[in-house]
Image (spheres, helix red, strand yellow):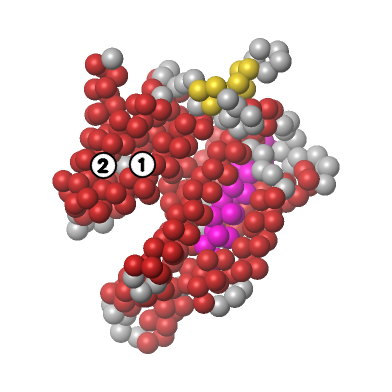
């Protein structure tokens, strides 16, 4: 038990130190803070929920020392609580009628992550409206120092044109950041034999039909002006991430029988975030979901075993 607590506390200390890197003036501090959830995922996915909670509490205590209780509370809500929820869901499992363990499906985990992001956006908008001048005033205050760096008026206008897309960028970045850290943590645990559950395959991702409705509704709202339009753009950015992953699953499934698969994937991921590759990948995932709903074959021709754990009720 003492070793269990020691590892959890150590992970919390490392995570808190990485979170504290945000207060550093160097740009590298942002990169360090981006992997702050990694130690939390390592203990949460490798040792269980209680260890994850201990690590989150320790990370919060360390964050207080860097920037005070408000910063620590923000970090706990933005990273700590979502990490605990996702680890808890990921470790749910049940036995089917054949006695085989069925783990919580990766598609459901994506919906939990997206739901947390949406809830965070709604709470942030409500909080800034009730206790401040509103979201748009806050975004303008964030953008003004950057706009002042441009001497040419056309450049400043181009920068201000991106104002409505800032929440969408942050929401998508947060979602992909948690996904990256959780995936990296699981990969490390599997590599050294400390994982509690097997790694889900990208090709196992299944999304409900209703999620397409969420995306279409978000796109409709994004065409409006004002705060509603900003919310629509942000919701669309969150809703498209699961289809982006589904598109990656299609590509992985398509390349599975190829002999040069790894070389092609390395080249593909090297180009992944060059415009418009991410949009094309998300479109491929959406097309795969639509074809599946219409009863067609999956583009990656994989089965639906990932859904079998949808009613998971046992934590490992």
**At x 39% / y 63%, what residue is drawn?**
127
In the rendered image, the residue lying farthest to the top is 99
Chain-order first, disc 2 or disc 1? 2
- Classify the position of the N terminus by image quarter: top left
Residue at figure coordinates x 66%, y 43% from the top left: 207
Where residue 148 sits in the image (x, y, percent)?
A: 29, 79
162 is higher (above) or lower (below) than 275: below
x, y percentage for residue 211? 66, 51
Instruction: Give the dominant element type of the magenta stretch: helix, strand or loop.
Output: helix
SS at mark 1?
A: helix
Residue in the image at 70% along x and 13% along y: 98
- Residue reaching furthest left? 65
* Real-space Cα separation, disc 2 to disc 1, in angstroms: 8 Å
Magenta span includes 120 = no
Q: Which residue is depicted at the point 26% across and 39% down?
A: 59
Specify the quadrant of the image occupied by residue 61.
top left
Query: Which of the numbered marks, if any, corresponds to residue 80?
Result: 1
Binning the other alpha carbons within 10 Å of mark 2 as few (below 14), some (14 to 19) or many (20 upward) gives many
* Kind of element beneath mark 2: helix
Q: Residues within 10 Å of mark 1 (few under 14, many from 20)?
A: many
- Name the residue that disc number 2 marks: 60
- The magenta stretch spans which residues? 233-257
Judged left or right of residue 49, residue 104 is right
């Amino acid at each position: 038990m003492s070793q269990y607590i020691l590892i959890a506390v150590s992970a919390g200390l490392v995570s808190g130190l990485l979170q504290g890197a945000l207060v550093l003036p160097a740009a590298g501090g942002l990169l360090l803070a981006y992997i702050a959830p990694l130690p939390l995922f390592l203990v949460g996915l490798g040792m269980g929920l209680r260890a994850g909670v201990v690590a989150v509490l320790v990370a919060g205590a360390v964050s207080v020392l860097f920037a005070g209780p408000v910063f620590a509370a923000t970090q706990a809500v933005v990273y700590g609580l979502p990490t605990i929820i996702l680890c808890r869901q990921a470790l749910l499992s049940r036995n089917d009628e054949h006695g085989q363990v069925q783990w919580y499906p990766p598609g459901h985990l994506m919906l939990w992550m997206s739901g947390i992001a949406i809830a965070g956006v709604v709470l942030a908008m409500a909080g800034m409206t009730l206790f401040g001048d509103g979201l748009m005033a806050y975004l303008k205050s964030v953008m003004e120092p950057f706009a002042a760096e441009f001497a040419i008026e056309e450049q400043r206008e181009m920068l201000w044109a991106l104002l409505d897309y800032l929440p969408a960028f942050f929401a998508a970045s947060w979602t992909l950041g948690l996904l990256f850290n959780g995936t990296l943590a699981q990969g490390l645990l599997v590599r050294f034999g400390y994982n509690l559950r097997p790694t889900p395959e990208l090709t196992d991702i299944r999304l409900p039909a209703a999620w397409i409705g969420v995306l279409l509704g978000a796109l409709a709202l994004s065409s409006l002006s004002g705060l509603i339009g900003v919310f629509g753009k942000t919701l669309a950015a969150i809703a498209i991430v699961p289809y982006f992953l589904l598109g990656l699953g299609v590509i992985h499934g398509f390349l599975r029988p190829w002999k040069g698969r790894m070389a092609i994937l390395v080249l593909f991921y090297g180009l992944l975030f060059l415009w418009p590759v991410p949009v094309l990948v998300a479109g491929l995932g959406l097309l795969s979901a639509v074809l599946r709903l219409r009863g067609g074959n999956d583009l990656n021709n994989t089965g639906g075993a990932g859904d079998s754990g949808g009613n998971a009720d046992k934590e490992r």
